[in-house]
Image: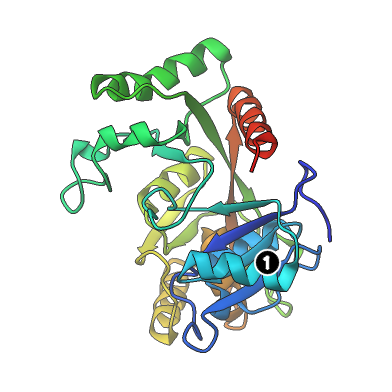
């Protein structure tokens, strides 16, 4: 199998939220990390696991509601795995972890300072003391290490205030407009405004947790948004939703702009209805300090006896 850039074989364990067939296959290999990408359709994998498997075919991806069961299934089906990666693993107290990274979004790192459901914090801020490090994500990087240290302090200061002293780091986010050669319908009228090159405005379609930030990112790139159809996170886009999108595009005489996560579910059905689909791609850009610290910590864990 292809190896991750670190030389380690990496497997992502995901719950596969919203996937179909979970009862028939409580643990499922979405990708073996062999360079071939997803083995199953997005409906059976879940949108995020499918996108991960397609974005980097070197990653093994396994979905299971019980991540312990998923890890055992991965070892049984894939053989040796050097590193398991989980999202939302910090609260998974029943599962042993060797390394915990807490992510805090730059736009609102303290989640309103309140726990769910009135705020966005899943645990009291003081619980961060049990983590190995905290990362300020989607930070506006690019002006040197002094600026990065200032951003880190935005997170480190409130953590110190509740008695938490752990390393803090930053990670940026690069957002770009990416239109694949196949993103337009195969058969088209060159004069059809629904199948034009990007630049003339879009109907933005999002089924993510923070659709407003997606719109802000699009507009920061200079893209004109004629209408924004905002669905719930992990939306499955049944026929009624597709009809709503098609109607908006024809009313606004604009093509679709959507996220990578939504495109894995939307691109094919919308193309079959004669619409062009353009994507906003996003990629995390961790700071050099974070990557160096992570390399050292993983090497320490691997070298520890037992």
Disc 1: CA contacts within 10 A as few (<14), some (14-19) or many (>=20):
few
Q: Is residue 29 left or right of residue 36?
A: left
User: What quarter of the picture does the N terminus occupy?
Assistant: bottom right
Any part of residue 277 in sight:
no
Q: Nearer the viewer, residue 222 or 242?
A: 242
Tell me residue 48's x, y (percent). 54, 63
Q: Nearer the viewer, residue 287 or 182?
A: 287
Give the residue drawn at x 53%, y 58%: 259
Any part of residue 85 in sight:
yes
Tell me residue 284's x, y (percent). 58, 40
24, above or below 203, in the image: below
User: What quarter of the picture does the C terminus occupy?
Assistant: top right
Residue furthest toward the left?
118
Q: Is residue 203 left or right of residue 33?
A: left
Q: Quadrant of residue 130?
A: top left
Give the residue drawn at x 75%, y 47%: 8
Give the residue drawn at x 78%, y 43%: 5
Q: Which residue is mark 1?
A: 75
266, above or below 146, in the image: below
Q: Identify the element where label 1 is drawn.
A: helix
Give the total of numbered labels: 1
Tell me residue 70's x, y (percent). 56, 69
53, above or below 282, in the image: below
Residue furthest toward the top?
146
Residue furthest toward the right?
1
Tell me residue 285's x, y (percent). 60, 35
Residue furthest toward the front?
306
Give the residue drawn at x 68%, y 75%: 185
């Amino acid at each position: 199998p292809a190896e991750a850039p670190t030389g380690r074989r990496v497997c992502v364990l995901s719950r596969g939220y919203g996937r179909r067939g979970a009862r028939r296959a409580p643990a499922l290999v979405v990708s073996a990390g062999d360079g071939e990408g997803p083995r199953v359709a997005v409906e059976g994998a879940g949108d995020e696991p499918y996108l991960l498997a397609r974005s980097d075919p070197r990653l093994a991806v396994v979905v299971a509601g019980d991540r312990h069961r998923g890890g055992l299934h991965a070892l049984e089906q894939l053989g040796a795995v050097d590193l398991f990666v989980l999202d939302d693993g910090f609260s998974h107290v029943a599962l042993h972890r060797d390394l915990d990274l807490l992510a805090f979004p730059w736009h609102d790192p303290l989640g309103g300072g309140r726990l769910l459901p009135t705020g966005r914090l899943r645990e009291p801020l003081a619980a961060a003391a049990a983590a190995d490090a905290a990362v300020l994500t989607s930070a506006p990087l690019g002006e040197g290490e002094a600026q990065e240290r200032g951003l880190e302090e935005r997170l480190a200061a409130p953590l110190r205030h509740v008695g938490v002293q752990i390393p803090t780091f930053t990670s940026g986010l690069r957002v770009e407009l990416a239109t694949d050669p196949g993103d337009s319908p195969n058969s088209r009228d060159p004069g059809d405004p629904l199948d034009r090159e990007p630049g003339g405005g879009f109907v933005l379609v999002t089924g993510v947790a923070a659709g407003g930030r997606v719109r802000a990112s699009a507009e920061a790139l200079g893209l004109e948004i004629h209408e924004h159809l905002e669905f719930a996170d992990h939306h499955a886009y049944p026929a009624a939703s597709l009809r709503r999108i098609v109607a908006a595009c024809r009313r606004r005489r604009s093509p679709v702009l959507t996220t990578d996560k939504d495109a894995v579910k939307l691109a094919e059905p919308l193309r079959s209805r004669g619409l062009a689909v353009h994507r906003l791609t996003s990629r995390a850009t961790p700071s050099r300090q974070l990557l160096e610290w992570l390399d050292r910590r993983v090497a320490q864990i691997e070298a520890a006896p037992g």
